[in-house]
């Protein structure tokens, strides 16, 4: 097994010695630097898997070094570990791309956890990088994207995969929630065990209970023999509960018991069974609203969303459309045995201009039909336009959407209206959430479903001031 390399950057000999003693073992090599400039040189030469860095050092500071390292080698996670934990420095470090900020003295257990998360994140991001191999190696289960927004999702997957906490995935329909759930399982310690997905909205409530928990012979009219449910089938692995908001209150109570006690009973039985299963759930609905309406249990909500991962809609990450287009065309060309599919620039422009209300699923279906129907293996603009028009008809909402938030004079924003509206909406959302969370940055980021680094970057971009002390988070 190839050794992991950890670069320790600190001007104090005793600190480097402590880290060296803590992390050096048969599977980990520790290299050291005493200042920022030396760290940059070593990072380029040795390509470490992780950097642990102080801020206050002679010559180039840690904050300067992290900017240079992130520019040259953005895939290397950098953990800032320093005794100088002012609010300004925390914000600056996270803005410049630090994976985490730890203030000395810190607990060894917490340090080990953060290092483990950082290494898992790097492994996941590397696995998502475009493959140099033949297109035949591409998987239909891969998450595809290179935009900053989807990279934040990659980072969250890498951070949570190694732990065993419940994860709630939120996002619009068609954004790829099951792909994220699958990736969490794949990069977890449960990867050798089953991953079982079930759509709670697709199964009638009376059948969903027996599907999840199983039943004994004679439990109901057609129960001619005993059957194990999904929780038994997923033993040791992961169960993915899609559209969790559609689960009845009765079943929510049984699911809560599993999360709290790790036990359940088959239908028609009083024998307790143990469920060693990680629960990942997903929804495209607002669960807080469902709680207020009495449709979802608040105690279950907090059990499910120990960690929340929010997948951005495709219209918010249009940088990913070209790479998704290439991915789907390659896949469907193989499926339909069509070689050398050509997509002209005019067709690509149409894909970039479309708003994609059905998200990645709509793009996938559009390109699948376009590849299948293409003549002379050329995806013409007319073909794209026709498929997008049909998709828009299929996805058109029953009611006209509210447009009251749009600027009165649309012409005043000619050429950048879309960008202006998105930015103003994002600014208002962040400001309102900060106010709701009473300035608590950690809670704000968690509620928004973004990292603190991304929150700080957006606050800086929009000039949002937070009067509350950072320490409150």
Image: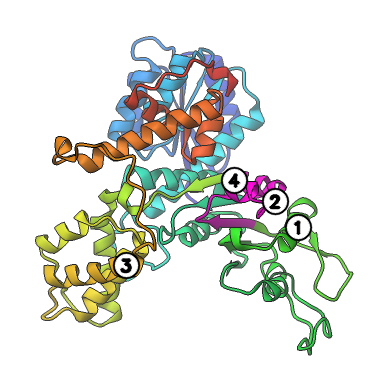
SS class, disc 2: loop
Label 1 Cα neighbours within 10 Å, binned few <14 / some 14-19 / many ≥20: some
Residue position marked by numbered label 1 in the rendering: 253
Tag on residue 12?
none
> Disc 2 or 4, which lies upstream in sequence?
4
Q: Quadrant of the C terminus?
A: top right
User: Which is closer to the viewer, label 1 or label 3?
Assistant: 1
Residue at x 62%, y 22% (from the top left corner): 106
Q: Quadrant of residue 77?
A: top left
SS class, disc 1: helix
Residue 135 in view:
no
Residue position marked by numbered label 4 in the rendering: 288
> Disc 3 or 4, which lies upstream in sequence?
4
Relative to 354, say whether 118 is above or below: above
Q: CA distance from mark 1 to mark 3?
A: 37 Å
Count of all numbered marks drawn on residues in the image? 4
Q: CA distance from mark 1 to mark 2?
A: 8 Å
Tag 3–tag 2 contact (CB < 8 Å): no
Tag 3–tag 4 contact (CB < 8 Å): no
Relative to 97, say whether 269 is above or below: below
User: Which is closer to the viewer, label 3 or label 4?
Assistant: 4
Magenta part of the protein: which range?
279-306
* Residue 430 image offset from top left, x and y in percent: 43, 32
Residue position marked by numbered label 2 in the rendering: 297
Residue position marked by numbered label 3 in the rendering: 364
* Residue 236 image offset from top left, x and y in percent: 68, 62
> Disc 1 or 3, which lies upstream in sequence?
1
Tag 1–tag 2 contact (CB < 8 Å): yes
């Amino acid at each position: 097994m190839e050794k992991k390399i950890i670069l320790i950057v600190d001007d104090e000999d005793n600190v480097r010695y402590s880290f060296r003693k803590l992390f050096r073992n048969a599977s980990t090599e520790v290299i050291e630097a005493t200042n920022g400039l030396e760290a940059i040189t070593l990072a380029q030469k040795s390509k470490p898997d992780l950097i642990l860095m102080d801020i206050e050092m002679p010559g180039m500071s840690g904050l300067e070094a992290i900017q240079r390292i992130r520019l040259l080698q953005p895939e290397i996670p950098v953990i800032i570990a320093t005794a100088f934990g002012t609010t300004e420095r925390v914000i600056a470090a996270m803005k410049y791309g630090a994976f985490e900020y730890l203030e000395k003295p810190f607990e060894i257990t917490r340090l080990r956890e953060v290092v483990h998360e950082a290494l898992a994140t790097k492994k996941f991001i590397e696995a998502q990088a475009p493959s140099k191999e033949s297109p035949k190696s591409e998987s239909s289960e891969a998450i595809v994207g290179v935009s900053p927004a989807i990279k934040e999702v990659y980072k969250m997957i890498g951070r949570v995969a190694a732990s065993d906490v419940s994860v709630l995935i939120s996002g619009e329909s068609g954004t790829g929630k099951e792909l994220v759930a699958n990736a969490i399982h794949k990069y977890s310690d449960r990867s050798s065990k089953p991953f079982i997905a079930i759509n709670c909205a697709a199964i009638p409530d009376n059948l969903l209970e027996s599907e999840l928990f199983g039943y004994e012979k004679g439990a109901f009219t057609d129960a001619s023999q005993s059957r194990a449910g999904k929780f038994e089938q997923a033993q040791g692995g992961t169960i993915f509960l899609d559209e969790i908001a559609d689960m009845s209150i009765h079943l929510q109570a049984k699911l809560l018991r599993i999360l709290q006690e790790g036990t359940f009973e088959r239908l028609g039985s009083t024998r307790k069974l143990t469920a060693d299963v990680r629960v990942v759930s997903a929804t495209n609905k607002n669960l807080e609203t469902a709680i207020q309406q009495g449709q979802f249990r608040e105690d279950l909500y907090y059990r499910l969303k120990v960690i929340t991962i929010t997948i951005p809609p495709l219209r918010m990450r249009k940088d990913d459309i070209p790479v998704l287009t290439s991915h789907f065309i390659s896949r469907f060309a193989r499926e339909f045995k069509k070689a050398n599919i050509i997509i002209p620039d005019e067709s690509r422009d149409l894909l970039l201009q479309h708003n994609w209300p059905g998200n990645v699923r709509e793009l996938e279906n559009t390109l699948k039909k376009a590849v299948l129907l293409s003549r002379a293996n050329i995806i013409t603009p007319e073909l794209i336009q026709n498929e997008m028009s049909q998709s828009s008809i299929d996805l058109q909402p029953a009611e006209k959407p509210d447009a009251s938030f749009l600027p009165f004079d649309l012409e005043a924003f000619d050429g950048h209206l879309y960008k202006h509206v998105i930015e103003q909406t994002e600014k208002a959302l962040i400001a309102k959430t900060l106010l709701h969370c009473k300035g608590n940055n950690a809670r704000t980021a968690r509620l928004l479903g973004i990292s603190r680094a991304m929150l700080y970057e957006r606050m800086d971009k929009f000039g949002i001031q937070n009067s509350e002390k950072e320490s409150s988070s």
